Image: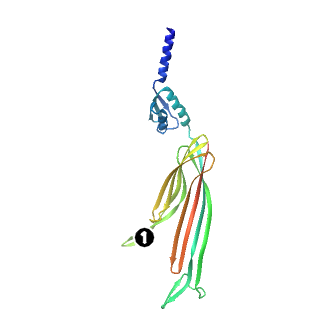
């Protein structure tokens, strides 16, 4: 009789252990909505979970609930303070070619003076051939919280002029607009490994529509060790122009190459 009772109790205990139960888990640092997809992937078809404020309500077997609790102990922790450093190195070159004539041309009783006119009663021809190379760079630092985006801006304000013409006259208006190259950086940590998500924004003046700023954006994901530099992008731009008139011509060609690196360090 005693043996039968003990066997019954063991069976009842095993069934209770395996039976689905409802557990409410209180979160300290994360919202339930943030961790809901992770818990759903752990449970699969072996349980259900819902979010309410900063609580997760789980219905599953005891073993599955313990598995979820073990994972949440690793994820639901105080986010670290981070120092993000961006290193920018630039290399630019400008080439100018052309000519300019300072003199006087007469034909049919008509005289045309070019440039500064004759110098010492002689026409002057100037050949333009000039190359300018510039190298530069710098570093920017921003403090961020693990898991939250921080914006790092690389850009400038440029004047944009609009002209208005009416039957009563015309006028121009100049406004400064931000032409921004920047990145939203979001970092999460796994030990000493930094998982980096970069959302870039690259504004530039439109070549086809004066006064219009074109905007481009891309997303990039990187992984690196804390304290180590990682190259995450670059910008290469070229430009050309021509300025010509009577007895004067100048063409310009330029390029700018920018390389970007990033480093993440903890501040805690």
Judge left or right: residue 6 versus residue 88: left
User: Which residue is the extreme one toward the left?
Assistant: 167
Residue lying at the far top of the rendered structure: 1
Which residue is at a point 39% across and 71% down the rendered structure image?
165
Residue nearest the viewer, comparing 54 with 1: 1
Question: In the rendered view, would you say 143 is above or below 126?
Answer: above
Residue 201 x/y as whole percent:
50, 55
Q: Position of residue 93 (x, y in %)?
A: 59, 66
Using the image, determine if residue 190 lies above or below residue 202.
above
Residue 14 appears left or right of 94? left
Colouring rule applied to residues: rainbow
The image shows residue 164 at horizontal and vertical percentages of: 41, 69
Name the residue located 52 percent from the left edge and 85 percent from the top edge.
113
Query: Foreground residue, 146 or 260?
Result: 260
| Residue 229 image position (x, y, % from top left) | 62, 50
Q: Residues within 10 Å of mark 1 (few under 14, many from 20)?
A: few
- Regarding residue 116, the answer to whether it shows in the image is no
For residue 15, say whether it is visible: yes
| Residue at point 49%, 11% (across, down) | 4
Please tell me whether mark 1 sits on a helix, a strand or a loop.
Answer: strand
Horizontally, is 44 left or right of 83 in the view? left
Q: Nearer the viewer, residue 152 or 93?
A: 93
Relative to residue 130, is residue 60 depicted above or below?
above
Residue under pointer 1: 171
Q: How many marks?
A: 1
Q: Extreme bottom residue here?
A: 109
Indicate the quadrant containing the C terminus: top left, top right, bottom left or bottom right. Answer: top right
């Amino acid at each position: 009789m005693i043996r039968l009772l003990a066997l019954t109790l063991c069976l009842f205990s095993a069934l209770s252990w395996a039976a689905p139960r409802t557990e409410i888990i209180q979160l300290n640092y994360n919202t339930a909505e943030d961790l809901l997809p992770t818990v759903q992937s752990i449970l699969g078809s072996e349980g259900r979970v819902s979010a309410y404020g900063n609580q997760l309500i789980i219905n599953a077997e005891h073993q599955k609930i313990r598995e979820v609790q073990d994972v949440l102990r690793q994820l639901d922790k105080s986010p670290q303070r981070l120092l993000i450093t961006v290193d920018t190195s630039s290399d630019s070159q400008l080439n100018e070619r052309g000519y300019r004539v300072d003199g006087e041309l007469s034909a049919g009783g008509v005289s045309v003076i070019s440039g500064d006119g004759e110098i010492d009663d002689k026409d002057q021809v100037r050949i333009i051939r000039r190359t300018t190379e510039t190298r530069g760079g710098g570093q920017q630092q921003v403090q961020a919280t693990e898991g939250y985006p921080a914006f790092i801006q690389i850009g400038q304000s440029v004047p944009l002029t609009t002209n208005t013409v009416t039957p009563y006259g015309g006028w121009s208006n100049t406004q400064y607009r931000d032409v921004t190259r920047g990145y939203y950086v979001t970092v999460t940590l796994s030990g000493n490994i930094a998982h980096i998500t970069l959302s870039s924004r690259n504004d530039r003046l439109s070549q086809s529509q004066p006064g219009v700023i074109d905007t481009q954006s891309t997303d990039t994901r990187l992984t690196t060790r804390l304290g180590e530099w990682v190259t995450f992008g670059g910008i290469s731009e070229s430009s050309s122009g021509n300025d010509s008139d009577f007895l004067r011509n100048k063409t310009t060609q330029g390029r700018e190459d920018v390389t970007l690196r990033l480093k993440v360090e903890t501040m805690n």
